[in-house]
């Protein structure tokens, strides 16, 4: 964890994997696919969130193979007592204030957009719309795949999807005013 008791990117992945196995035992390959799918749909591809090792979780005694032996035979993994404690610790960690650099970049684009010629302002407006559409499509895809058993995640996704739909509408109106 960071000094302020917030999760590092690797710990966020660890929480994702441990939480999935806490809900129900999962095959090694299914767990890896679940973690990759969920994280990439929420934040997009990220080098910071590449590959937490499920083998490391096994080595640390947080998950155990209850059927099979490991990655080579796609073992069925279950959470151990130590894994449940670790998941609880990660799940109750503090939240870090939003530090997304892209928010700053977007704000700066809007702040200085008037310095560009009309064609480049239109190009930047289209770029912002495209970025919003990409983010919206990621969340819509995620929502579709977790529609069954997503619990509170569905509520959160619906909220974020609504915000993105409003943002997209605003960006399109903004582009039309340029």
Image: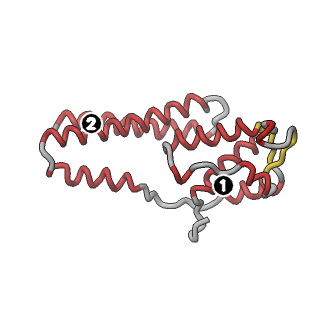
Which dot, 1 or 2, sits closer to the camera?
2
Q: Which mark, residue 126? A: 2
What secondary structure is found at the residue carrying circle 2? helix
Residue on which disc 1 sits: 91
Q: Where is residue 41 in the image (x, y as percent from the top left)?
A: 52, 39
Q: Which mark, residue 50? A: none
Where the N terminus falls, by quadrant?
bottom right
Where the C terminus falls, by quadrant?
top left
Q: Earlier in the sequence, mark 1 or mark 2?
A: 1
Instruction: In the rendered view, tell whether residue 48 sits above or below residue 127.
Output: below
Q: Which of 74 and 112 is in front in this view?
A: 74
- Bin the neighbour count of mark 1 within 10 Å (Cα to Cα): few under 14, some 14-19, many 20 and up: some
Residue lying at the far bottom in this picture: please name it.
Answer: 3
Q: Which of 8 and 47 is in front in this view?
A: 47
| Quadrant in which residue 90 is drawn | bottom right
Q: How far apart are marks 1 and 2 (CA)?
A: 38 Å
Query: In the image, is 99 to the left or to the right of 35?
Result: left
| Quadrant in which residue 104 is drawn | bottom left
Query: In the image, is 106 to the left or to the right of 17?
Result: left
- Bin the neighbour count of mark 2 within 10 Å (Cα to Cα): few under 14, some 14-19, many 20 and up: some
Name which residue lies at 45% across and 57% down.
98
Query: In the image, is 154 to the left or to the right of 126?
Result: right
């Amino acid at each position: 964890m960071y000094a302020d008791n917030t999760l590092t990117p690797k710990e966020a992945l660890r929480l994702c994997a441990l939480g999935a196995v806490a809900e129900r035992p999962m095959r090694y390959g299914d767990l890896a696919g679940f973690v990759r799918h969920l994280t990439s749909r929420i934040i997009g591809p990220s080098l910071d969130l590449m590959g937490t090792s499920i083998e490391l979780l096994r080595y640390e005694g947080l998950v155990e193979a209850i059927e099979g032996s490991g990655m080579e035979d796609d073992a069925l993994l279950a959470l151990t007592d130590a894994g449940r404690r670790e998941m609880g610790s990660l799940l109750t960690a503090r939240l870090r204030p939003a530090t997304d650099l892209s928010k700053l970049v977007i704000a700066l684009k809007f702040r200085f957009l008037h310095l560009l010629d009309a064609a480049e302002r239109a190009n930047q407006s289209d770029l912002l719309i495209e970025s919003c559409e990409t983010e919206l499509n990621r969340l819509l895809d995620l929502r579709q795949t977790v529609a069954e058993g997503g619990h509170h995640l569905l509520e959160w996704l619906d909220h974020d999807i609504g915000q993105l739909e409003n943002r997209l509408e605003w960006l399109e109106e903004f582009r039309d005013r340029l």
